[in-house]
Amino acid sequence: MTTRPDSPAGRPRAGRIRRWVVPAVFWTLVLSLFIVFGPDVLRHDSTAPAATAPAATPAPAPPSTADAAGRAKGAARVSGPTMPRSAPTRLKIPKIGVNAPFTGLEIGPSGALEAPPADDTNLVGWHTSGITPGERGTALIAGHLDTATAPAVFARLGELSSGDRFEVRRADGSTADFQIDSVESFRKDDFPDRRVYDDTPDALVRLITCGGAYDREAKDYTENLVVFAHLAPRT
């Protein structure tokens, strides 16, 4: 899966994630992560492509750590728990059997965010210069839905619902626990950028993958599935 960024690690048999759109007033992760898709493993739609890799689409770069820190400094007073910055190491979503390591995603030569390796079905990625899960702000976690031959890490993401929980293990030895607020699908040509990536004084996470029908002409799926979640107080 590659972000609209034409990731150097272009998938051999899978699609890619779209790039981010950056608002003019502030750096916002405007992600249209268009993940590589082969057959729709959730529905096993016989009309879904078997080995066609979606075309890569260009996307603006996500904000840097300095930009994110500046936004957080000027944001409203925190209303929920937050944690210090620490890189994520593992994502665990018990309800759908996810237990995956993280890989850092960088901005490639084209100015787009690279995607996780296309040949690894159990891997999620995060932008290393962006917000870390648990830190104040909106952190992004991207994962492939499937490949041309097998389901990938976020194949069952659509089974999650409000109230479900997941955790992110972090490099400092801490664990960030998140509670899901909603799970929604958006057409890629009408993606609510501000709602998904707007500034926030709280610690939020978005899990993003692709969904909807497969457009054979565009070689891409028509929607993005987004899981909205917030950092839950430790009990």
Image (spheres, rainbow, N blue to C red):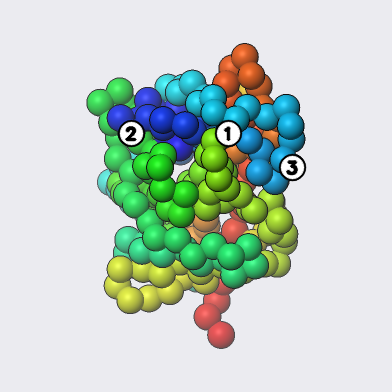
Q: Earlier in the sequence, mark 2 or mark 1?
A: 2
From mark 3 to mark 1, how far is it between C-alphas? 12 Å
Indicate the secondary structure of the residue bearing disc 2: loop
Mark 2 vs mark 3, foreground winner is 3
Q: Dot 2: within a 10 Å radius of its alpha carbon, few (fewer than 14), some, or many (20 or more) residues?
A: some
Residue at label 3? 43
* 52 up-or-down from 104: above or below: above
Q: Is residue 218 left or right of residue 60?
A: right
Q: Earlier in the sequence, mark 3 or mark 1?
A: 1
Q: Dot 3: within a 10 Å radius of its alpha carbon, few (fewer than 14), some, or many (20 or more) residues?
A: few
* Residue 140 at x, y percent in the picture: 47, 49
| Count of numbered tags | 3
Answer whether residue 215 is visible to the viewer in this image: yes
Considering every residue shown, the one lying at the far top of the view is: 217
Residue at label 1? 38
* Residue 86 at x, y percent in the picture: 32, 64
Residue at label 2? 9
Which residue is drawn at the image coordinates 47% and 31% (left, top)?
Answer: 13
From mark 2 to mark 1, how far is it between C-alphas? 17 Å
Q: Amino acid at mark 2?
A: Ala
Nearer the observer, 110 or 40: 40
Q: Quadrant of residue 12?
A: top left
Q: Amino acid at mark 1?
A: Gly
Nearer the observer, 157 or 201: 157
Q: Earlier in the sequence, mark 2 or mark 3?
A: 2
* Residue 7 at x, y percent in the picture: 35, 30
* Residue 183 at x, y percent in the picture: 69, 51
Q: Dot 1: within a 10 Å radius of its alpha carbon, few (fewer than 14), some, or many (20 or more) residues?
A: many
Q: Amino acid at mark 3?
A: Arg
* 201 up-or-down from 36: above or below: below
* 9 up-or-down from 130: above or below: above
